[in-house]
């Protein structure tokens, strides 16, 4: 790019009147071609997204996030209702969600699948199976996979906003601080690669979890 600019600006003053116009057009054409090549292949021009997705850490109920396109379920392998997040999501979504989930189950720790939101205020639910602490190993990699796979699924479906609960930190027993470090580091690693997701929210149920996540995020 630099070479190109220097090259032509150097020759520019040597052209007069009649000769100038075709030369200018040729330069313009070359330049436009070059820019559209960069736009297509490198995202290096004006159209480059400069705004990185926002990460919010808030207290709340995952089923009460009406401004969010996709909420994440801390699911069980069978993608059925249950306790905690899964119970709350299935109750709010209605029986249609379990029906849609049936052919997608079972899933393995770290995996994520997407369904519609049914009666929830959200368009989508992304169901992740977190690791059971102490028995699904390596737990840190499996938990990171949940966040990574959920974000990839959201991004590839053109989703702009996503809310996570603290996966695995309830019935599955993952220590909150370690889970927070994995969640935040994985999200931050993924953020520069996201094309569509602009808002990522972590929704914590308790003040103590909120404090831990905020501290970890710095
Ligand atoms: N909104 C936000 N966070 C919540 C909510 C809510 N409505 N309810 C609970 N939490 P858990 P897991 C918090 O147990 O550990 C289920 O029975 C909760 O305080 O829902 O991945 C499934 O069927 C905790 O901090 O998910 C699975 O079998 C966090 O969300 C199993 O539990 C996760 O708690 C999954 O266990």
Image (cartoon, helix red, strand yellow):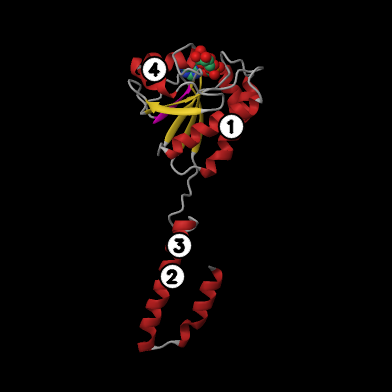
Query: What is the C-alpha distance between the residues marked 2 and 4?
Result: 55 Å
The residue furthest top is: 83
Q: Nearer the viewer, mark 1 or mark 3?
A: 3
Residue 184 percent coordinates (x, y)? 59, 32
In this figure, which residue is indicated by the disc labeled 2?
31
Q: Is residue 27 above or below residue 66?
A: below
- Residue range of the region highlighted in magenta in the rendering: 68-73
Residue 95 percent coordinates (x, y)? 35, 15
Query: What residue is drawn where x is 49% and y is 42%?
Result: 194
Prevailing SS of the magenta stretch: strand
N-terminal-most mark, 2 or 4: 2
Query: What is the C-alpha distance between the residues marked 1 and 2?
Result: 42 Å
In the rendered picture of this protein, how many numbered marks are placed on residues?
Answer: 4
Q: Secondary structure at mark 1?
A: helix
Q: Nearer the viewer, mark 3 or mark 4?
A: 4
Crowding at label 2, few (<14), some or many (≥20) Cα neighbours within 10 Å?
Answer: some
Query: What residue is drawn where x is 50% and y is 43%?
Result: 52
Please give left or right for residue 208 compared with residue 15 in the image. Answer: right
In this figure, which residue is indicated by the disc labeled 4?
98
Query: What residue is drawn where x is 40% and y is 16%?
Result: 90
Residue 139 percent coordinates (x, y)? 64, 24
Crowding at label 1, few (<14), some or many (≥20) Cα neighbours within 10 Å?
Answer: many
Please give left or right for residue 188 compared with residue 54 in the image. Answer: right
Query: What is the C-alpha distance between the residues marked 3 and 4?
Result: 46 Å
Q: Secondary structure at mark 3?
A: helix
Q: Quadrant of the C terminus?
A: top right
Residue 196 percent coordinates (x, y)? 43, 41
N-terminal-most mark, 1 or 2: 2
Query: What is the C-alpha distance between the residues marked 1 and 3?
Result: 35 Å
Could you say which disc has been placed on residue 37 in the image?
3
N-terminal-most mark, 1 or 3: 3
């Amino acid at each position: 790019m630099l070479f190109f600019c220097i090259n032509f600006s150097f020759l520019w003053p040597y052209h007069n009147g009649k000769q100038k116009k075709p030369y200018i057009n040729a330069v313009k054409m070359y330049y436009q071609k070059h820019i559209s090549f960069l736009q297509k292949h490198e995202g290096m021009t004006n159209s480059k997204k400069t705004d990185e997705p926002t990460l919010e850490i808030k207290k709340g109920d995952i089923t009460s996030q009406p401004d969010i396109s996709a909420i994440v379920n801390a699911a069980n392998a069978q993608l059925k209702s249950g306790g905690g997040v899964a119970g709350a999501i299935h109750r709010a979504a209605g029986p249609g969600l379990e029906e849609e989930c049936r052919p997608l189950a079972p899933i393995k720790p770290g995996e994520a699948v997407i369904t519609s939101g049914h009666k929830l205020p959200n368009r989508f639910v992304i169901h992740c199976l977190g690791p059971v602490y102490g028995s699904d190993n390596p737990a840190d990699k499996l938990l990171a996979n949940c966040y990574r796979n959920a974000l990839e699924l959201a991004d590839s479906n053109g989703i702009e906003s996503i809310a996570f609960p603290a996966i695995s930190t309830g019935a599955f027993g993952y220590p909150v601080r370690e889970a927070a470090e994995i969640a935040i580091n994985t999200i931050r690693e993924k953020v520069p690669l996201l094309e569509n997701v602009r808002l990522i929210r972590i929704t914590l149920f308790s003040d103590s979890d909120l404090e831990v996540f905020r501290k970890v995020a710095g």
